Image (tube, rainbow, N blue to C red):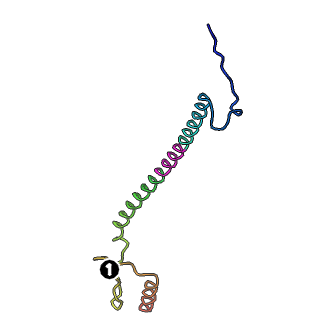
Amino acid sequence: MLKKKVKRVDIDSLPPGSVDEKSGNTINFQRLLQAFLDLQKDNVTKKRRLRTAKKSRDVLLAEVRFLRQRHKELMKMQPNTLVPEEKLLPQQDPPPTLGKLVLKPTREESREVTAKSSEVKR
């Protein structure tokens, strides 16, 4: 058998731009591998951000659902907390109404009512 003599040449000794085919493939492979690894790293980062964004969106949707349900319950209970029209003094202008319901008097109005009722009792 004949053995071929392989000519070994240091890459640094070659003029720029002339690289043998095997080392050129190695450099190209390394460059492609590095590009792939960078893309994979970016992909993992974006997936993690997307997962975090989805979790926070789900939390916010759950909070909105809860608050809507709570608002609905409070609106059902609201007629119990309103003051009937008969309890208002006749000389006062009635406060703005929401349908048949009357809003509670403010603190100042309730103080005036209390002061007037204490004068009447004397």
The quadrant holding residue 78 is: bottom left
The quadrant holding residue 91 is: bottom left
* Rendered location of residue 107, percent (x, y): 46, 82
Residue in the picture at 57% in, 35% down: 33
Quarter placement of the N terminus: top right
Q: Which amino acid, by three-letter code, is at mark 1?
A: Thr
* Rendered location of residue 96, percent (x, y): 34, 82
Looking at the picture, tell me which residue is in the foreground, 104 or 61: 61
The quadrant holding residue 100 is: bottom left
- Main secondary-structure element of the magenta-colored stretch: helix
- Residue matched to label 1: 97
Q: Is residue 4 above or below residue 105?
A: above
* Rendered location of residue 117, percent (x, y): 42, 88
Say which element carries label 1: strand
Image: magenta residue range: 42-54
Q: Is residue 85 above or below residue 26?
A: below
* Rendered location of residue 58, percent (x, y): 44, 52
Residue in the picture at 35% in, 87% down: 89
Looking at the picture, tell me which residue is in the foreground, 80 or 114: 80
